[in-house]
Amino acid sequence: MAEKEKELKRKIKTAEKKLDNDLLAKYHSLKESEIMEIVIHDKWLSSIYHSTNEEMDRIYHNLAGRVRELVERYETPLPNLSNDVKELTAKVDQHLKKMGFRW
């Protein structure tokens, strides 16, 4: 069992070394236009795209939350609120009269 493990580790190490050597050889053979393609299109534009999407999602969630807040705040029409205020004012006045306050 330990022999198989050692053999597998040796094969992995050999494969990694070959991959590193191939990568280094490819790196040296890249043209300027290929480097620009990799850096600009594959790396920077991808990063910008993801950052932009994250920012748009954040703004969307903030706006949705604000709209929900406004809907809750203004869902009761003003005439209903005015009626509620009148009813509650009358109740408070009754309680104050029972407590002996006069105005």
Image (tube, helix red, strand yellow):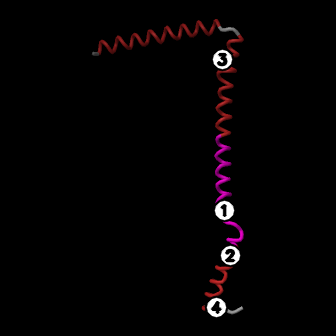
The type of residue carrying mark 4 is Lys
Estimate the spatial distance between the alpha carbons at disc 1 and disc 3, rounded to whole Å.
Answer: 53 Å
Estimate the spatial distance between the alpha carbons at disc 3 and disc 4, rounded to whole Å.
Answer: 82 Å
Mark sitting earlier along the chain (1/3): 3
Mark sitting earlier along the chain (2/1): 1
The type of residue carrying mark 1 is Glu
Numbered mark located on residue 75 in the image: 1
Nearest the camera: 81 or 27? 81
Cβ–Cβ under 8 Å for marks 3 and 2: no
Mark 1 falls on what kind of element?
loop
Cβ–Cβ under 8 Å for marks 3 and 4: no
Q: Give yes or no for residue 75 being in the magenta stretch.
A: yes
Residue 81 pos. (x, y %): 68, 71
Give, as a single range, the part of the protein colored magenta: 57-81
The type of residue carrying mark 2 is Asn
Judge depth for marks 3 and 4 and give the one in front.
Answer: 4
The residue carrying mark 4 is 97
Estimate the spatial distance between the alpha carbons at disc 4 and disc 1, rounded to whole Å.
Answer: 34 Å
Mark 2 falls on what kind of element?
helix
Mark sitting earlier along the chain (2/4): 2
The residue carrying mark 2 is 83
Q: Residues within 10 Å of mark 2 (few under 14, many from 20)?
A: few
The type of residue carrying mark 3 is Ile
In the image: residue 14, left or right of residue 81: left
The residue carrying mark 3 is 38
Residue at the image position 27 percent from the left and 15 percent from the top: 1
In the image: residue 52, left or right of residue 4: right
